[in-house]
Amino acid sequence: MALKNRIGNVFSLTSFGESHGPAIGGIVDGMPAGVKIDFEQVRLEMARRAPGQGGATSARQETDEVEFLSGIMDGVTLGTPIGFIIRNRDQRPADYYHLKNVYRPSHADFTYQAKYGIRDHRGGGRASARETAARVVAGALAKQVLAKLGITVTASQVSQVSQASQASQANRSTFHVPPSTHQVNHTIPQGDTAGGIVECVIRGVEAGIGEPVFGKLSSQLAEAVMSIPAAKGFEIGLGFDFVNHHGSEVLDKFVVKDGKIATATNFSGGIQGGISNGSDICFKVAFKPVATLMQPVEGIDSEGNAVTIEPRGRHDSCVVPRAIPVVEAMAAIVVLDNVLINRVARL
Amino acid sequence: MALKNRIGNVFSLTSFGESHGPAIGGIVDGMPAGVKIDFEQVRLEMARRAPGQGGATSARQETDEVEFLSGIMDGVTLGTPIGFIIRNRDQRPADYYHLKNVYRPSHADFTYQAKYGIRDHRGGGRASARETAARVVAGALAKQVLAKLGITVTASQVSQVSQASQASQANRSTFHVPPSTHQVNHTIPQGDTAGGIVECVIRGVEAGIGEPVFGKLSSQLAEAVMSIPAAKGFEIGLGFDFVNHHGSEVLDKFVVKDGKIATATNFSGGIQGGISNGSDICFKVAFKPVATLMQPVEGIDSEGNAVTIEPRGRHDSCVVPRAIPVVEAMAAIVVLDNVLINRVARL
Amino acid sequence: MALKNRIGNVFSLTSFGESHGPAIGGIVDGMPAGVKIDFEQVRLEMARRAPGQGGATSARQETDEVEFLSGIMDGVTLGTPIGFIIRNRDQRPADYYHLKNVYRPSHADFTYQAKYGIRDHRGGGRASARETAARVVAGALAKQVLAKLGITVTASQVSQVSQASQASQANRSTFHVPPSTHQVNHTIPQGDTAGGIVECVIRGVEAGIGEPVFGKLSSQLAEAVMSIPAAKGFEIGLGFDFVNHHGSEVLDKFVVKDGKIATATNFSGGIQGGISNGSDICFKVAFKPVATLMQPVEGIDSEGNAVTIEPRGRHDSCVVPRAIPVVEAMAAIVVLDNVLINRVARL
Amino acid sequence: MALKNRIGNVFSLTSFGESHGPAIGGIVDGMPAGVKIDFEQVRLEMARRAPGQGGATSARQETDEVEFLSGIMDGVTLGTPIGFIIRNRDQRPADYYHLKNVYRPSHADFTYQAKYGIRDHRGGGRASARETAARVVAGALAKQVLAKLGITVTASQVSQVSQASQASQANRSTFHVPPSTHQVNHTIPQGDTAGGIVECVIRGVEAGIGEPVFGKLSSQLAEAVMSIPAAKGFEIGLGFDFVNHHGSEVLDKFVVKDGKIATATNFSGGIQGGISNGSDICFKVAFKPVATLMQPVEGIDSEGNAVTIEPRGRHDSCVVPRAIPVVEAMAAIVVLDNVLINRVARL
């Protein structure tokens, strides 16, 4: 469940912040009481999201120190809301003055202006990917709870999809191991950018998690990851490749493993009818190439005049490596929320 | 926003019903007052969802007469909740007795049992696609409101994706017309089933609709359509094909059309930063082949014993044609909800 | 949590229906799976709400047969939403034609028209107390779950408040037994109406239930019962009488009872800081005299002309007796919702 | 609508913070874009809530400087969430060490411990009235929007209720002016505390605001103000005094004023059927005497042993004066939320 700047039901994150305002941050509500927080783990997750993961780096130094303001005492959660902030360093509003009346192509400049009649033109404002830092904080907390329940969330970049790789996947008897965990390193032309695909595997979720018919676990995961900036596609299990197979080829037959009913294959990606079946939950997210190029780009001003935008600073040529911990964070938030809410399914 | 059996914020559908219980139905809350309802239009939408759209048909006669119980007086909406029911005809519980303790592969039998400790084994129960009839009713109401606002929602089945078609799409200057509206007719082996892809185009949505950062229009559409039974993938605009292009190739450059700022291309699918940009909104949904085959299938019983399930009755070999009006319904619900909520974006 | 026609979070009721439409009804979502339903108990609760509890009766025969349409199989809940309807009998729209353009004083005629630009003028439409029948159905289901958890909800009418009775209450060492359970029977002048006060006691709620800071158990109870037609006041524990005492007189001192920490008195009504403390939860609701008199009343038409409205049919001179099961129903819904959601408070 | 630490639907506040943690704060989501914020007005509202309004003051210096972190650029709202924090000064955890295992009577110590298995024992933690500072910030923002719509929210303390005053109120032809706006100044014994009643009048709300049947404006106001610490009663219009009158005495007859339909009296407090009728909205809230006395009090420790708690520092003998701006804040939040959501009532 997402409503404007809030996601989650019984475990939720409400976030705030523009990229060049004083700070970004959020409130995690519904964190179970009595959990010892490993702050170093939070710091490590933040480091994974920091610039410089994708070769070329953004010049902007994001130290991203998280300050926790409530909900934790002596390192243990109180059950009350956890407020946190991350100060924005290196604010140089003047750097962005030339964009005040300019809409960059494939950015959110024009749409925010259309919606609100006003926008923060500095570095993307609320639409900046900087906003995802708050997600990683909430995700890091969620992961620590999930770990205690034996659940892990691991994402990695996969090679660009091709028909061939899809076919081979269909023949594999299982998705239990992600098909490719090494980093893609194809050549991006100078000044240009590339997108990519992130695969995420959630292990250790028992059968029974998810809230049909509208709160299916697959729907909630789709909603959550599609809210990440630049996400343009989502698929679970075989996903779009299902259309290349007939029903008889992709049934996940049941077997008995360790005395428990399980499936021999995992074409469905761990979810049937919107509810987890005990197998690994596997989904993929497609990210478009980031729209900020290191070359002149043609924009338009609010009067409709063409404007050439010269590149400034340095930016990641591929956002995908930095998106990985964000995908994990969103998945962790959704899974924890659903694991908790499942406690009320039966008397 | 979806919560268990409710979807939508200010315009919402709450639905109920098992396939072989007395009735299914729902409550549409937040329908604007003063709208003249065209009941014939509702009936036509229901007919599009009825069995027999996909060649082979389900033997079960679904007349699907909708009885409206409230919220409408003399054919005009009152602003109060619209309750409606659709009686289930042709209930023959005995036909399903053999499935009482059996889990069919790639169905929701096992997961519902795992979640609730009990399940309605008759024809899929709550997990049956029959549940989507309530969605179509709500969608038919939403469409009538949208029509008054100049917004249309049109879905169609596209050929199975191939690398080739994807590449050609990337070269097209626009998605304003869906690439393929004719029906797929490839050969499905006797007794087997096939999945497919539905493309949906929403025309007439002004720039500014969507609620970032978690309620992005793309996230909400993803959530809504991924909650349709058998949906396994979602992509917007170029979607997964974005990874085959560099940033410079897929920027949607601005132009001035009829005195308004628009984009020359529509790689992004009509949404930037989670907010509509005034272009057509184009997304695709992948459906897996339906798991009910017209051939013997191996299941498992609750004790872990293998069970052969013989086919009974007749079932659609491809659900995609019947899924088309459901995709439209979900899209219409999301768009209306967001168009309405956008009224509070500014003072 | 209430949103338009929905109340509750993890256990919720969404209701629909006008008094003179085809039917009223609702959907109970979040009913725990595996509960054996006692339908006779539901029928008895409905009978308590039926006309004729308050001496003078409404002529309208409300048999109020509840038809359950989903969510229950062989008498046991499935965990899926429970849809139900109650047909409206004895619809005679012509009886209300004279009210089509008339606003009765202290009714919702004018306000519904102002809000929606249209209204159902027949017998109050959506604003009719008939709507509360759906609440009693949901409450009857909630009570059955609560009973299994050792929780009971009992309301009764109390004498009209007076300073004297309030003072005596303050001196009582405990509220564990409601101060007065006999029915009020003061004389109501011919053709006139009277209001009254309902006290409700909830027994068996363990300490720890409620969701501060905005979802305090007291807030949620207040919201829920103040949504009952004609409710105009709410107080918990000593309530308004607290202002007649100094702090030192009304502290609920702790004692140890049966090896557990409890309070010697219960001035606070069983809730501290928005969370139950294990004592009985005691609150009162004030209902205004019903505005439908059995004597000519002056209204106004939509043009602003004074109109004399002649009494028709027969109506209850005091709604309070019929409100008692509705108060219990709302309390039961809130308490069950909160008992369930408390399962996620700790890991 | 309130859910744990969030209140409001389309205009909402999510708050966080313990009294002796690093900071309290919140996120206001749904603030309409384009509103020029008067920060001095926010500061003034905060000053009204500061200690020292009620004669005796809390020794704790609460400068309560609000730092806005997002959602506002150059003093104008962006439509994005407004994050804000207020640092807690003067933290002396050691001052509270003696309360670590002690439950004070009529405080939330015991109930928080029962719920979460852990609690912040320092100064009440999350249950401290300090939490209300975040409400006042959100309320100050809401008031500024309401002012542009011609709506004002004004609360004041009224004398303690007595039967006499209630009777006289019933005879008054209107509540348009609150019956008493001067401050109560009765004698509170040394070291003791007193409660009181706050009356709130909302002027300028047009007819049509409120969301029946569960989101009645009266229900939402009740929920919102009953969530304020120490609130124990709520009544609207005549409230509990309705029971001292017959229906014929308290009908709000219609008249035509300035060409518009209005009511001659306002017994109902401006709301009929849960929807505003254009009259002033008048409600009262009862606050219990604060439980922190300036005299020794008997508590209990977690082992069940009686403990005498000596008074420390200085505390308000009556919270009511400081509660006034909080009541206004909650009313402003509810009214703005409902005024905005009413924009979707009709097409």
Image (cartoon, coloured by chain):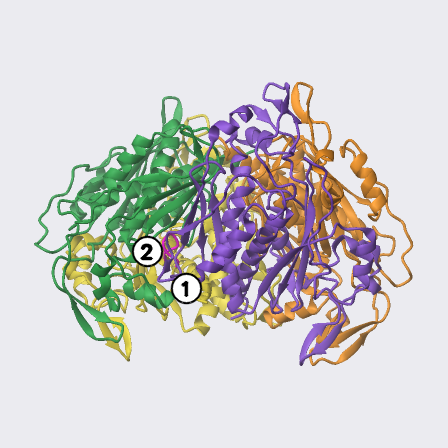
Chain colours: A orange, B purple, C green, D yellow
Magenta residues span D211-216
Tag 2's secondary structure? helix
**Of C139 and B164, which appears nearest the observer?**
B164
Is B79 drawn above or below residue B23 in the view shown?
below
Mark 2–mark 1 distance (CA, rounded to whole Å): 13 Å
To which residue does mark 1 refer? B33
Q: Is residue C55 visible?
A: yes
**Mark 2 — residue?**
C126
Q: Quadrant of residue A288?
A: bottom right
For the question of whether residue B212 can be seen, the reply is no
Q: Main secondary structure of the magenta part?
A: loop
**Residue D122 percent location from the top left of the image:** 51, 42
Which residue is located at x 69 percent, y 68 percent? A109
Badge 1 crowding class, 10 Å Cα cut-off, few under 14, some 14 to 19, many 20 or more, is: many
Of the pair A211 and C20, the residue shown nearer to us: C20
Amino acid marked by disc 1: Ala
Percent across and percent down for residue A58 are: 82, 59
Position of D321 with respect to D245 (left or right) is right
User: Disc 2 residue type?
Assistant: Arg
* Residue A182 place in picture, x, y as percent: 86, 41
Q: Residue at x 60, y 67 (%)?
A: B205
